[in-house]
Structures are given as C-alpha cells and as structure tokens.
Image (spheres, rainbow, N blue to C red):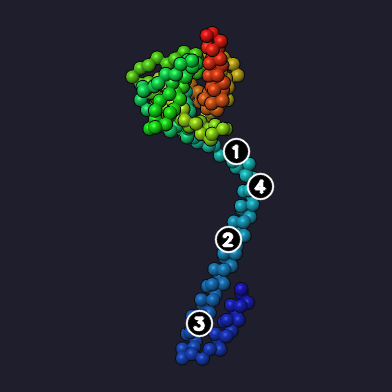
Amino acid sequence: MKCSLLTVAAKIKQVDHPDSQIYQLVIFKFLRFFLAYLSNAIIIVLVNTGGAMQQQSNGMQIISAIPSIKQYLTFNTGGECYALGILLVKEIIEFGGITKIPLMPNFVRGVINLRGSVVPVIDLSARLYGKCVDEGKRTCIVIVEIPDNAEGLTELGVVVDGVNEVLELNSADLTAPPQFGSKIRTDFIEAMARLSNRLLMILAPEKVLSVEEMATLVAATEHASAKEH
C-alpha cells in the first residue's frame, strides 16, 4: 500500500499544472496524513488483537470475578418469604375463578381460563407444607412459565399469600441452602439471601414446580382413589 502511494506521488510530481507547486504541496500533505493515519490504524488493530487474545485466555477468571445481578419477585406463603427469578414470571392476577378438579392432590387447586388457555393452578403453601393457603385480601395467583422437556414451556398458576416487591440481588449476596433444619424440602431451595430484616429463600423452580414430579403425584392420587372405590 505504501509503495503504490509513493508511485502515485512520483507521477503527480511530473504533472504539468498551472499551479503545480501548490498542487503538489497539497497532494503530498494529503499523502503524508493518509500514511500516518494508516500506520496508527495498524497499531490499534494489533493492540486490540493482543488484548482480545489475553482476555480470551483469562476468560474464566474474568467471568468468575464479575458478580452477576439478577431480579427476583418476592412473596409470602406459609408465613415465610420466598422468591422466584423474575424471568419466570409472566404476570400476576387476582385470586379467583378456579375450577376444581376431583381426585387431585391438595396442592392442585384446579384450573383457570386465562384468555382462552387452560392453566393449572398450584397452591404453593400446600406444595411446600401440605397445608393450603389461608385466602385473604392479598392472596393472588402468579402466572409462571416453567421449562418442560416434553413441550418447551408450561404455564402454571401459583397461589401465594401476597407478593411484595422485585429485588435485585448480587450473586455475591447469595449463600448455599442449608442441608438440614429447613421447614421444607432442601432441594426446593436454590439459594438464600439475608436481607435487612428477614431471611429470603430463593426457590428452585425446576424442583418445587417440577411438572414431571407433580404429574406423578397426581397419577398416584388418582390410582389410590380408584383402589378405594
């Protein structure tokens, strides 16, 4: 590139122009500027390439060093404060309009018609503690989308005592769930976070809202009822 520009400069020097000296001076200044710009551009590319390679080689260290921030919807059920990742939450609706289905375990409250879609409704208190939620003014249904290996995403309605707020939590603020001493199954808890005035338990949706496990429990309940009759 540099050789071809010098060749062009030599040819320009031979041009017969009324203001040849001024003309040549302008052209040479332009070429000098262009060559300087080209040299700087090459240096910048080399520096960036080296930095990118160094960053790639240390990628695992960089990712682990930077804490991630996630948002969680917090709510109460069974006298405790829990949270779910906000990305799972589709909407929150008023409690009511539930059609009960016979021969279901107590944590299956029934189904609702959500804009033409039939959505199963789970009582979270009954799922965690075996006792249905005490309905009150703040009782509501949280509509969530749970990954399902068979069908992609499954919509579920989750009955809770009441929702609180959306919190941003840093991964550095989270601790591992306890191995014992919890009122609920330990595999239902993904992590824990201590807030200013309470302990927040983050639920593991793939466990507590496992479609496969709940379907197995429903089938077992139906089978038991059939044997009784």
| Point 60% across, 38% down: residue | 64
- Identify residue for label 3: 25
**Is residue 10 shown above or below 190?**
below
Q: Earlier in the sequence, mark 3 or mark 4?
A: 3
| Point 50% across, 23% down: residue | 201
Residue 89: give x, y in percent of width and height.
45, 32
Tell me the CA gap for discs 2 and 4.
20 Å
Residue 50: give x, y in percent of width and height.
63, 55
Q: Is disc 3 placed on a helix, strand or loop?
A: helix
Q: Is disc 1 placed on a helix, strand or loop?
A: helix
Tell me the CA gap for discs 2 and 3.
29 Å
Which circle, 2 or 4, is nearer the viewer?
4
Residue 94 or 61: which is nearer the viewer? Answer: 94
Tell me the CA gap for discs 3 and 1.
57 Å
Residue 77: give x, y in percent of width and height.
44, 19
Type of amino acid under label 2: Ile
- Which image quadrant is residue 139 in? top left
2 lies left or right of 119: right
- Identify residue for label 1: 64
Q: Residues within 10 Å of mark 2 (few under 14, many from 20)?
A: few
Q: Earlier in the sequence, mark 2 or mark 1?
A: 2
Q: Which mark is residue 44?
A: 2
Query: Does any portion of residue 8 appear in the rendered image?
Result: yes
- Which image quadrant is residue 5 in? bottom right
Are dots 2 and 4 in contact, CB under 8 Å?
no
Which circle, 3 or 1, is nearer the viewer?
1
| Point 40% across, 25% down: residue | 112
